[in-house]
Amino acid sequence: MKTLLVTGGAGFLGSHLCERLLAAGHDVLCVDNFFTGTKANVAHLMEHPRFELLRHDITFPLYVEVDEIYNLACPASPIHYQFDPVQTTKTSVHGAINMLGLAKRVKAKILQASTSEVYGDPEVHPQTEGYWGRVNPVGPRSCYDEGKRCAETLFFDYWRQHRLRIKVVRIFNTYGPRMLPHDGRVVSNFIVQALRGDDITIYGEGMQTRSFCYVDDLIDAMIRVMATADDFTGPINIGNPREFTILELAQAVLRLTGSRSRLVFKPLPADDPKQRQPDIALAEKMLDWSPTVELDCGLEKTVSYFKAQLQTGERETLDLAR
Ligand SMILES: NC(=O)c1ccc[n+]([C@@H]2O[C@H](COP(=O)([O-])OP(=O)(O)OC[C@H]3O[C@@H](n4cnc5c(N)ncnc54)[C@H](O)[C@@H]3O)[C@@H](O)[C@H]2O)c1
């Protein structure tokens, strides 16, 4: 049994990770400033004897004794990371420095939740870990993309300079229960719009492709990465390589919700990548892992979650978030 720190543990991915780590028998310290995470996401864990929740902003130092750190804290959707872009960069960069400093002090192993956004609008397809990316350093998405790139740099410098045990995971589009409604992420947007009977907004002609990984597959891979030998640092892509157009996703959501929403088309936002697909050969080899949840199955679980939210009094949350 280990003591594990999950920053951003009250968020979408973090809350699923806390659950899985507790189930594996570990002590879990969940740290979050509740910017995009909620206590409701971890409410079911609060009575667990090995779970602890701490309100803390990782742009400030943290002094705790832990064996491993999963660094997930950072708003992940454009609406949230563009709300206060300076704070977003601080969370990625100062947050990484603080968590790496902690890992160094207590000799903990540390994993960074990086992102496929480090590849920017890629010229190669699918993206392998060796591709350096094509990122705009001065656009509205840069606070997130460049912040995450700088965090990766810091991780590798701590590894080179201080021999810290690091793992860098590049996460591609992941979806599932506990995503926030109306946060600009395409899966939750489409589902909520469909459940309400609102128009479904498609940017461009909907022919841009995305790959969607169900949260359970992602968490499984993340835990496997942490367990790899110390000489394995990553970066390693985690995602589902199966590609769908945005239009296909919208149609699947309409089918699974039985909704009669209309599809409406709007101009593509600046810097929106047209195509993004992980090459997961490294993950398959190093982790003996590949995603197992089909899109329809994952979407069904996500639709059920949002349906329950709408039906059980969380309606106000959805209304407020509009
Ligand atoms: N979900 C995805 O598809 C995806 C894809 C690529 C990368 N990621 C990365 O995975 C991580 C988790 O993403 P998510 O989808 O769960 O997003 P999320 O917004 O649900 O979770 C982020 C969590 O971090 C917390 N947080 C933000 N700033 C903080 C700070 N300064 N101090 C402490 N806590 C802070 C938020 O309150 C939230 O609980 C992020 O680092 C994100 O960049 C996610």
Image (cartoon, grey):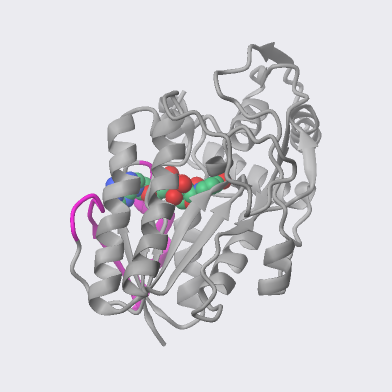
Q: Nearer the viewer, residue 298 or 151?
A: 151
The magenta stretch is 36-61
The total number of labels drawn is 0
Q: Is residue 103 visible?
A: yes
The residue drawn where x is 28% and y is 33% is: 86
User: Could you say which is closer to the camera, residue 53 or residue 161?
Assistant: 161
User: Residue 23 location in percent, x, y?
Assistant: 51, 77
Whether 231 is drawn above or below 216: the answer is below
Q: Is residue 46 magenta?
A: yes
Q: Quadrant of the N terminus?
A: bottom left
Query: In front: 159, or 40?
Result: 159
x%, y% of residue 245? 78, 32
Can residue 65 be seen at all in this image of the molecule? no
Q: Is residue 262 left or right of residue 9?
A: right
Observer-nearest of 20 and 132: 132
* Residue drawn at the location 50% of the way across and 61% of the way down: 168
In the image, taking residue 308 as reference, residue 68 lies left or right, namely left
Q: Position of residue 230 (x, y in %)?
A: 49, 80
Residue 4 lies left or right of residue 252; in this view the side is left
Residue 282, located in which quarter of the rendered image?
bottom right
Which residue is outermost to the bottom?
1
Residue at image coords 42%, 63%: 44
Compared to 112, does 25 lie above or below? below
Q: Which residue is drawn at the image coordinates 34% and 78% (left, top)?
A: 49
Residue 244 sits inside the magenta stretch: no
